[in-house]
Image (cartoon, rainbow, N blue to C red):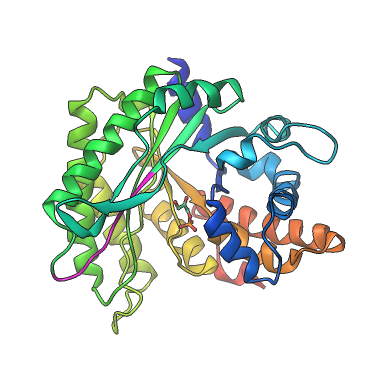
Amino acid sequence: MSELEKIAKQMVAKGKGILAADESTGTMTKRLSGVNVESTSKTRLKFRETLFSAESMKNHISGVILYDETIKQKTSSGKSIPDLIKSFGSIPGIKVDTGAKKLAGSPEEKITEGLDGLRERLTEYYNLGARFTKWRAVYNISNKYPSELAIKSNAHALARYAALCQDNGIVPIVEPEILMDGEHSIEDSFIVSEEVLHTTFYELYSQNVQLEGMVLKPNMVLSGYECSDQADVDEVAEMTVTVLKRCVPSAVPGIAFLSGGQSDEDATAHLNRMNQILGNHSPWNLTYSYGRALQAPALKKWSGDVNNVPDAQNEFYKRAKLNSLATYGKYDPSMEE
Ligand code: 13P
């Protein structure tokens, strides 16, 4: 088995998932101001260190996606952040896209940038300890969108990124995210998810990306936030599993979902139901790569006070543990009590 395959398998190992802690400084500032904490490089580090040094890292977190600022920071005891993560047997990763910008030719849509100079940045991040990366493309659903142009250009960029990562000994997380914003129905989300995933895998194939050495990070198939008819857990799980079966080759070792603004409990319940449906014969391990759905209760509890660190770590433990159970299909909402 190649080194890339080994890492990809570890990232999606049963019972574990990925912590997405790669918020840009702008997004992190929004999150911190939500709990009345001023955003400085120190406070961003303090919160992230609270998570990365928690007990749940050992059994429930296979890898952590970092942001450029964090991968270069050191803990209060002088350890580098990647070393702290590795000390729990977890793998450090890094977001390498530089954000979603206006798409020329369809300016209401977005194209993710960051390919220029990527090879050099990959070498730098590898030397800092990163063994996997993330690149996120975003698509909006409306009457007009996403356009074929947005779907094709983002798929092309995702595949270029993935091929470059593998060329540098790094496992790419390929993240095409169809946003929940809007009034669209779950059926609309299904149709768009299918087209986006097909196009993405076509490009990955065209650019010689080794499917065994990557991880897919998709959205779940959901009703839009403002849709009056919200799909229930069974519908979400069944439609998501159907679209994945149609589009994702079984050579891909694992699928690690983003939470995308779902409530913490919904994100866990949906993952759990999908694993129940697929059972032991699933072609891929289905797990979590959540940002908000793993961090939100811990952030609220922490609120910038060092005395709250143990309670914040307990909140993180709870979400990580329940999502870990969901990877076995053994979660029950009564466990939230
Ligand atoms: P959420 O789980 O908060 O959607 O974040 C995951 C992520 O990495 C988005 O790019």
Q: Residue at x 26, y 62 (%)?
A: 140
The span picked out in magenta is: 136-143
Q: Residue furthest bottom?
A: 228
Q: Position of residue 41 (x, y in %)?
A: 69, 49
Q: Position of residue 130 (x, y in %)?
A: 56, 28
Question: Which corner quadrant holds the N terminus?
Answer: top left
Q: Position of residue 135 (x, y in %)?
A: 39, 41
Tag count: 0
- Is residue 125 visible from the viewing direction of this image? yes
Question: Which corner quadrant holds the C terminus?
Answer: bottom right
Q: Nearer the viewer, residue 325 or 22?
A: 22
Q: Is residue 332 left or right of residue 32?
A: left
Q: Residue at x 64, y 64 (%)?
A: 32
Q: Is residue 120 left or right of residue 303?
A: left
Q: Residue at x 75, y 36 (%)?
A: 74
Q: Is residue 48 above or below residue 311?
A: above
Q: Nearer the viewer, residue 160 or 334?
A: 160
Q: Is residue 235 above or below residue 208?
A: below
- Is residue 64 visible from the viewing direction of this image? no
**Can residue 141 be found in the magenta stretch?**
yes
